[in-house]
Image: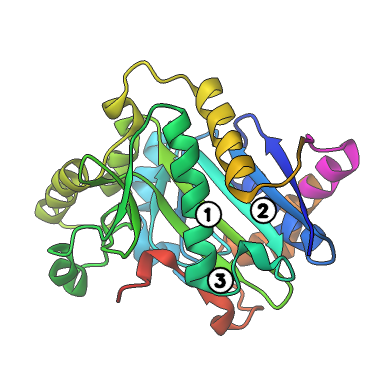
Amino acid sequence: MSFSLRFIIDPPRGAAFNMAADLRLMEQCAAGSIVVVRLYSWQPATVTIGRMQRSRAQLDDAALTRDGVSWIRRPTGGRAVLHCEDLTYSCIFPRTVAAMGKSVNATYATITRCLVRGLKEAGIETTVQDSASPLIRSGRNVKLPCFLAPNRNEIMARGRKLVGSAQYRSDAAVLQHGSLPLTAAYRGLPRYLPLPHGERERQTMLLEEKSIALNEIDPAIKLPELITALEGGFTATLECGSIGQPWSNEELAEIVEMSRDSLFRERWQADPPRCDLPDESIVSICEQSE
């Protein structure tokens, strides 16, 4: 079927708004023929964890409070990610849009092509390959964060992982979102994990060795130019018309209301998570290789 692209470029927003916005877009897209690409960031810095993870087991609450870092559960699966000085993307579409891929891997491959093309337009050369296989053995003993989780068909730059992504497929729509670190700030994640000191130091070292930030590739890269390039990557790869359409006042009001709802907070910002979606609907790109 034919479809169009809608781009939403958001200013930095809080954790509840960002996750409510992605969920709201899934509801909107389910009955339509629009592919939505949303580019956004976080204020304050936020650790996101996978949909079925418990914050008490995954996060150091005292460290989060000390540094004023928020946390929220993602609709997708996967491991912990620190969103600090990063650009997050989400790509959301109805499952009837066959061009976006009919399976987890097909969708991931399509969105990867869009990102790779956009990054190239921004002057960032990448490859698509398997990420660090030596980490597989470590991952069996300690749950590694997303940017260390070994995976197939990762977006890599200079031999290191550049993008961490995860995907959720409902009966009607698909959400894939991921993080592109602008600086090395994302490597501060181990500070907020309940790890022994030695393991915290090891993971911090591995993050530096196995993953990379955009300004480590090009110190002169600017966010507006990167956003424009990524938009171009999606438009050119998908070969369809596009429109930059910000939130309407009605949409903003709905998202804010949703983010403040008690059921939303029980599901995404409390422990244990309220399980109201079937587990089989969740696909984590970060855990695809396990």
Point out residue 3 in the picture as x, y percentages from the top left corner.
78, 55
In the figure, is residue 115 to the left or right of 2? Answer: left
Residue at 86% x, 37% y is 248
Horizontal and vertical percent position of residue 266: 64, 65
Q: Quadrant of the N terminus?
A: bottom right
Give, as a three-letter code, the residue at label 2: Asp
Tell me the quarter of the picture where residue 140 sits.
Answer: bottom left
Residue farthest along the top direction in this orientation? 220
- Which image quadrant: the C terminus? bottom left
Q: Which range is magenta? A: 244-255
- Asked if 105 appears above or below 149 in the picture, the reply is below
Q: Amino acid at mark 3?
A: Pro
Q: Tag 3 or tag 1, which sits nearer the N-term?
A: 1
Which mark is drawn over residue 111? 1
At x 76%, y 42%, the residue is: 241
Which of the pair 248/157 is nearer the observer? 157
**Could you tell me the amino acid type at mark 1?**
Ile
Q: CA distance from mark 3 to mark 2?
A: 18 Å
* Tag in front: 2 or 1: 1
Determine if residue 68 is in view. no
- What distance separates the C-alpha of mark 2 from that of mark 1? 16 Å
Residue placed under numbered mark 3 in the picture: 273
Indicate left or right for 54 with 252 as reference. left
Residue 22, label in figure: 2
The mark that comes first in sequence, 2 or 1, is 2
